[in-house]
Image (cartoon, grey):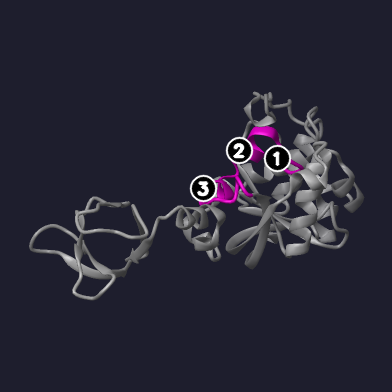
Amino acid sequence: MSLLRQVIPTPPPHAESDRLTFALTRCRGRSRAWSGTAYRVTSVRRANEKDLVSGEGSRLIGQRWNPPGLFRTLYLSLDHQTALAEALAQNTRQGLPVSHSLPLVLTAFQVKLDCVLDHTDRRIRSILGVTLDTIISTPHELGPETITQAIGRLTNAACFMALLVPSAAVRGKRNLVIFRSKLAAKDLRIINKDELPTNKRALASGLSYFKKDNLKYFLKSSSPEPGDRCRIRMSEGVSLRRSPVRDAVEVWLGREGGESRFSLSA
């Protein structure tokens, strides 16, 4: 049985939870906005639009900044080298050799957050009563809630959207830990999502697509014929008709009287 299919119990709260809760009230005026590009490395199987941003895997098994079973958390890195190092380190902890974890997919995200607590700031760590060494050396395998998991749990319960944290895989680098329930669609965007392996496989398997109003419409075949139907993501009627242009068809969207026409090369 894979780890993700097991039901992992949520550990009881860390013994210092009350102290940390009080300390976090002193941090509320010290949050800051953060925007920029962040990165994540995943397996090919997980490199799809849903899994990349769901945070469900971290909820199921727990990670450094969230205990298992409670809330979804998205882990990103501020540079691509650190993202790769973090992914390989996690696989190593789970007993998976590097050669068996490849190939991997590196994905970039455009992120804009309003309320981030920066744990790379020595003053924040001082208020919380934790050291840099404690943060990066605390293990997070299955077991009692760690102090970093407690901080994440209590920060999520407060007004913060995310944490900036030091990387445990690459000394001096930073990661971004986002609480998924605090995230709006406008806060996170996958860069070049059409290049994800799932979309590439769809094209390689003979599916063509075109776009209208930022929605993607997949055709059944790379050589469509009049009368073929499209697999679409909206309720409008779609049909293909022979175009006067050689080796092309016309794509008609909409119902009678309100149709729009597009040309698509076969």
Within the magenta stretch, is there residue 209? no
Identity of the residue drawn at 51% across and 47% down: 50
Residue furthest right in the image: 133
Outermost bottom residue: 245
Q: Are marks 3 and 2 in contact (CB under 8 Å)?
A: no
**Is the Cβ of the residue at disc 1 closer than 8 Å to that at disc 3?**
no
At mark 3, the secondary structure is helix
Identity, as a three-letter code, of the amino acid under mark 2:
Phe
Task: Identify residue for label 1.
Answer: 66
Q: Quadrant of residue 71?
A: top right
User: Could you tell me which secondary element the residue under label 2 belongs to?
Assistant: loop
Find the distance from the CA under tag 3 to the CA under tag 2.
17 Å
In x, y percent, where is residue 263?
Answer: 26, 71
Asked whether the viewer can see residue 4, the reply is yes
211 lies above or below 177? below
Residue at the spot x=91%, y=50% of the render? 133
What residue sits right under mark 3 in the picture? 50
The residue under label 2 is 71
Amino acid type at mark 1 = Asn
Q: CA distance from mark 1 to mark 3?
A: 20 Å
* Image spot of residue 42 (x, y percent): 67, 50
Which region shows up in magenta? Answer: 44-66
Q: What's the amino acid at mark 3?
A: Lys
Image quadrant of residue 175?
bottom right
Q: In this view of the protein, which residue sits in the foreground, 200 or 227?
A: 227
Q: Earlier in the sequence, mark 3 or mark 2?
A: 3
Q: Position of residue 65 (x, y in %)?
A: 73, 44
Q: Confirm whether the magenta stretch covers residue 45.
A: yes
Crowd tier of the residue under label 3, counting other residues whose Cα lies within 10 Å: few below 14, some 14–19, many 20 or above: few
